[in-house]
Amino acid sequence: TPSNSSAASDVYKRQVLIPFFLLATGDKNATLTLTAILLTIFTIAENHRLSSLGNFRGPGRRLMFMLYRPDEYIGIGAHIFLLLSCLLVVLIFPKEVAIPGLVASFLGDGIASLVGLKVGGFKLPSGKTVIGTLSGSAVVYVTTALFTGPLPALIPAVIYVALESFKLPVSDNLVYPLVISAGCYAVKQLGIA
């Protein structure tokens, strides 16, 4: 989930390009290679950031507060989990499942965060807002429906609401793409799509 800073949301916007790269090329190996290279580069940068935490002063400190959510200041940034989940989804699932699963989870989670932050309102046990969760679910539904049709898209949308409703023990950026893609895979295997 992106924070409210524009710098952090830029990271998320760029990661949506991975499923579009897979869609454009149709090449899982090239997509896996690209994602692995990006994950390696960002992991090295993240390791440097985490090992330098005590040394951040002035502009470097302000930049860190712009790019990261409070729970990420001394932990791994969301972009690492997103890249890892992209890598796993592309590795595990066929491209017909990976593309809608990744696009739906990225767009849904991003919209949920934006709407939740802007509108606010009643919160779920996870701490996320009902309006944000419903907005994200609608985006997951519409995005998935473009690939599967309207009825099968209900499964990933319901999965999204379930995931948003409870506090997860790990980053939602790791879980959402995997579980929503698994929902898309179930739809495909059950012959609903």
Image: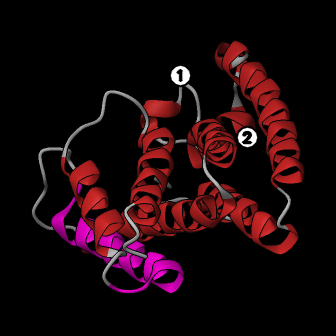
Of badges 1 and 2, the one in the foreground is 1
Q: Is residue 3 visible?
A: no
Residue at (66% x, 65% y) in the render: 13
Height in image: 51 above or below 192? above
**In the depicted structure, whether residue 28 falls above or below residue 59:** below
Residue at (12%, 45%) from the top-left corner?
125
**Residue 188 image position (x, y, % from top left):** 46, 65
Q: Position of residue 107 (x, y in %)?
A: 51, 69
Q: Which residue is mark 1?
A: 74
12 up-or-down from 45: above or below: below
Find residue 134 and report its image quarter: bottom left
**Residue interval drawn in magenta:** 128-150
- The label on residue 177 is none
Q: CA distance from mark 1 to mark 2?
A: 17 Å
Q: Secondary structure beneath disc 2?
A: helix
Element assignment for label 1: loop
- Which quarter shows the C terminus? bottom left
**How is the rendered protein coloured?**
secondary structure
- In depth, the one of 31 and 189 nearer the eye is 189
Query: Which residue does the numbered mark 2 point to in the structure image?
Result: 59
Badge 2 amino acid: Pro
Residue placed most toward the observer, 162 or 186 = 186
Image check: 105 left or right of 26? left
- In the image, is 1 to the left or to the right of 134? right
Mark 1 residue type: Ile
Please name the predominant secondary structure of the magenta segment in the image: helix
Q: Residue 63, image x and y in percent?
A: 68, 43
